[in-house]
Image (cartoon, helix red, strand yellow):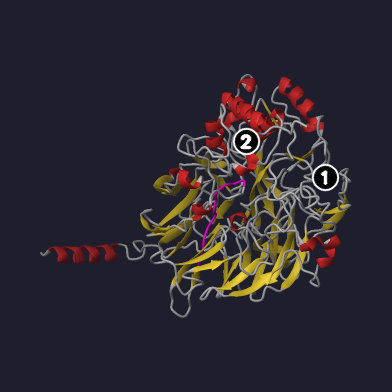
């Protein structure tokens, strides 16, 4: 399973991540443990993303409540369920 | 008097004054990942003991210095290694799969070897870059000591004196582990986290496969042996049997032709005297939907005993049929000697994520405590043909609570209880082995166990097995994405929108979230069970500021423990501390706070230069990974 942790020491915005508020935070936090590819392939609602982020926090991700909102908003906006 | 004569005189005087007491006690190695090849995680050392452990101090520390690398998009994961110590030198692997040799008494770095595993980018495993240890092989012809590292898809042999590759091994010191597999494998999808096993002149390796890699012909889990001198492939055991092999008929509809995983990612153990190798085998792909692999699926979720020289199967016991829960055999099978029924028996113990403890005669595979096949709830998922019964260890207590009902909703406060009940009512609840459902099934233990890769520590003095276990659930959904074989890979599409954490951080089920168990394998009774570790995020959460919280909430973590003749169980595992626990009572004798860093490795202990050390890895993911060495 996946782990996340937000540190200020590195990580890079993956070129595949679209621009938008939260891109830097997502790139830094999510790539601590797993490749960004796993996000690119997913299509989840905001609630689903939030549930996943909660799991990551339980596994060691150091995120504030504000971080959670920013990441969930970004992921739902760019990797949400297909509109059809 | 010249200076050197002064010295001689002093030495003579010292020897005359205390001829026996002044002798430096001999070094005591920790030469194998689990202390011995059978993985008891027991040390005969007692310099540090229950009477003096409160004086234990940090003696030295060493930092990996590993950081995210922008060029490759990589980041080091948890520092989960357990070092080896032989003849005063410590050998360990780092999250980035580097091998480092340290002076065991001082922590001074002697050499480091970097396989540059990051050049292949971030590993697909959800754990990120982790590596738990290396193995050593002594060439009996030359007397040379070698270090074996399995890094992603490569097996590398190093000179233990210099850290340089041994060019006679494979191609310039490296064997390509992808050669000989039954179908082509993407190198980036093939990983290794547990150390190899060395038997005589063979090096034996399993492999890891990321759970989320779900496609037909994903990496197979074959276990392979290589000549330690040349790197030549010697034998291969097919964890998914091929047509004509024993067990192939447990893969219906030809599903053995395309099913991967079923790998041995957890450490294997060895009965070196008898030449028997024990494999903890994992769940096939995919973890939560078996509609494309009908049948019991041998040797998935099994304990398998092989002839270590030939790879020929001696016996096996499947502990989950047609796995649907990611209940991999997660930890090294512990080879122990117990007295039972008036006999002394060489046994093997398999701890499980589902919380059962299974004990077998090491030679015959005969269960030493009853195992019953009991009916389990049916699946309501279209296309799924779940097994109707599952093995239950009925003669030994389970290590953790199993199954979920509304009674398990957290009761930290009345308001949180109501919120938790509302969450639970959205999910399918039930006993252990309730299958995944489209609605979402809440299973407990979750995917991190119960027991996990830390396994158990066995005290041969008392026949007691010590196990750090998690008490946390997971929601499981079937994942249909490989149903037609056309989806090349998938992301976390199996997620629902139910969070198991109220206000992002309060687990929906009651604490404790982890235990330390002491199970008497001779009487079959639990000697003691104590909540283990704490959860700062819960303890300091605004919603519980007026609640009376238990002294220990429990810390979820997968690292294991060790036990010593000094009467101590050293344990970390998810907590931000290393603990010395009284092995008789479970009382916490000494705690060392690791600050912001979690304890992430299984500890080890050794004596070097006349002093006993206890070492544990802490920190990560990202940065901060540090090895801590304690001594009196």
The chain identifier of the residue carrying mark 2 reads A
Principal secondary structure, stretch drawn in magenta: loop
Residue at x-position 24% and y-position 66%: B12
**Which residue has dot 2 on it?**
A58
Residue A23 drawn at (x, y percent) = 55, 31
Residue B386 horizontal side relative to residue B354, left or right: right
Q: Residues within 10 Å of mark 2 (few under 14, many from 20)?
A: many
Residue at x-position 38% and y-position 56%: B105
Task: Return the residue nearer the eye: B291 or B87.
Answer: B291
Span shown in magenta? B126-136
B289, above or below A5, in the image: below
Please, what secondary structure does the residue beneath circle 2 have?
A: helix
Q: Is residue B592 magenta?
A: no
Q: Is residue B134 magenta?
A: yes
Residue B492 horizontal side relative to residue B187, left or right: right
B366, above or below B108, in the image: below
Residue A22 drawn at (x, y percent) = 56, 28
Give the numbered dot on residue B624. Answer: none
- Which residue is farthest left? B1
Measure how far apart labels 2 and 1 are at the Cα level.
24 Å
Please, what secondary structure does the residue beneath circle 1 have?
A: loop
């Amino acid at each position: 399973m996946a782990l996340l942790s937000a540190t200020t020491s590195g990580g890079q915005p993956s070129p595949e991540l679209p621009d938008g508020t939260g891109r830097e935070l997502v790139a830094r936090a999510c790539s601590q443990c797993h490749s960004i590819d796993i996000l690119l392939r997913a299509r989840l609602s905001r609630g689903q993303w939030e549930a996943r982020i909660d799991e990551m926090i339980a596994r060691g991700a150091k995120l504030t409540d504000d971080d959670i909102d920013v990441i969930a908003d970004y992921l739902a906006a760019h990797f949400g369920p297909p509109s059809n | 008097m010249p200076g050197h004569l002064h010295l001689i005189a002093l030495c003579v005087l010292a020897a005359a004054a205390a001829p026996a007491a002044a002798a430096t006690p001999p070094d005591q190695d920790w030469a194998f990942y689990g202390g011995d090849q059978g993985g008891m995680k027991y040390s005969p050392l007692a310099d540090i003991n229950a009477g003096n452990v409160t004086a234990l101090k940090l003696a030295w520390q060493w930092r990996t210095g590993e950081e995210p690398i922008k060029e490759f998009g990589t980041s080091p994961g948890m520092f989960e290694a357990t070092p080896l110590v032989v003849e005063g030198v410590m050998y360990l692997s780092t999250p980035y799969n580097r091998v480092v040799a340290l002076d065991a008494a001082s922590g001074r770095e002697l050499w480091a070897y970097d396989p540059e595993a990051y050049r292949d980018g971030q590993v697909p495993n959800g754990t990120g870059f982790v590596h738990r240890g290396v193995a050593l092989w002594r060439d009996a012809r030359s007397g040379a000591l070698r270090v074996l590292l399995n890094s992603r898809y490569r097996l590398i042999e190093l000179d233990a004196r210099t850290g340089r590759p041994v060019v006679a091994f494979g191609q310039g010191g490296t064997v390509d582990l992808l050669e000989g597999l039954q179908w082509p494998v993407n190198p980036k999808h093939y990983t290794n986290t547990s150390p190899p096993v060395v038997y005589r002149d063979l090096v034996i390796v399993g492999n890891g496969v990321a759970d989320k890699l779900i496609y037909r012909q994903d990496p197979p889990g074959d276990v392979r042996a290589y000549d330690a001198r040349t790197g030549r492939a010697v034998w291969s055991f097919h964890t998914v049997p091929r047509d004509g092999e024993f067990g192939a008929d447990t893969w219906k509809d030809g599903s053995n032709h395309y099913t991967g995983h079923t790998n041995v990612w957890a450490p294997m153990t060895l009965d070196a005297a008898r030449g028997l190798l024990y494999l903890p085998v994992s769940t096939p792909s995919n973890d939560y939907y078996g509609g494309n692999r009908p049948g019991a699926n041998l040797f998935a979720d099994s304990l398998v005993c092989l002839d270590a020289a030939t790879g020929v199967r001696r016996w096996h016991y499947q502990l989950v049929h047609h796995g649907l829960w990611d209940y991999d055999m997660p930890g090294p099978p512990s080879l122990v000697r117990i007295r039972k029924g008036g006999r002394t028996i060489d046994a093997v113990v398999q701890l499980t994520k589902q919380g059962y403890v299974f004990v077998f005669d090491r030679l015959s595979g005969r269960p030493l405590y009853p195992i019953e096949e009991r009916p389990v709830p049916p699946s309501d998922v279209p296309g799924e043909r779940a097994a109707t019964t599952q093995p239950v260890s009925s003669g030994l207590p389970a290590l953790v609570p199993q199954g979920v009902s509304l009674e398990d909703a957290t009761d930290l406060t009345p308001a949180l209880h109501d919120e938790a009940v509302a969450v639970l009512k959205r999910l399918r609840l039930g006993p252990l082995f309730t299958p995944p459902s489209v609605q979402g099934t809440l299973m407990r233990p979750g995917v991190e166990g119960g027991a996990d890769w830390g396994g158990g520590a066995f005290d041969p003095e008392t026949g007691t097995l010590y196990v750090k276990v998690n008490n946390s659930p997971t929601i499981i959904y079937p994942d249909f994405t490989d149903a037609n074989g056309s989806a090349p890979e998938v992301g976390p599409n199996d997620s629902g929108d139910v969070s198991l954490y109220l206000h992002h951080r309060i687990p929906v089920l009651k604490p404790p979230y982890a235990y330390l168990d002491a199970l008497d394998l001779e009487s079959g009774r639990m000697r003691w069970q104590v909540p283990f570790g704490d959860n700062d995020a819960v303890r300091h959460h605004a919603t519980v500021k007026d609640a009376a919280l238990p002294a220990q909430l429990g810390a979820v973590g997968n690292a294991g423990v060790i036990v010593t003749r000094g009467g101590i169980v050293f344990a970390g595992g998810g907590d931000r501390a290393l603990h010395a626990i009284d092995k008789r009572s479970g009382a916490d004798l000494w705690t060392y706070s690791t600050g912001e860093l979690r304890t992430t490795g299984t500890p080890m202990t050794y004596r070097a230069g006349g002093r006993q050390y206890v070492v544990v890895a802490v920190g990560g993911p990202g940065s901060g990974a540090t090895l801590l060495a304690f001594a009196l």
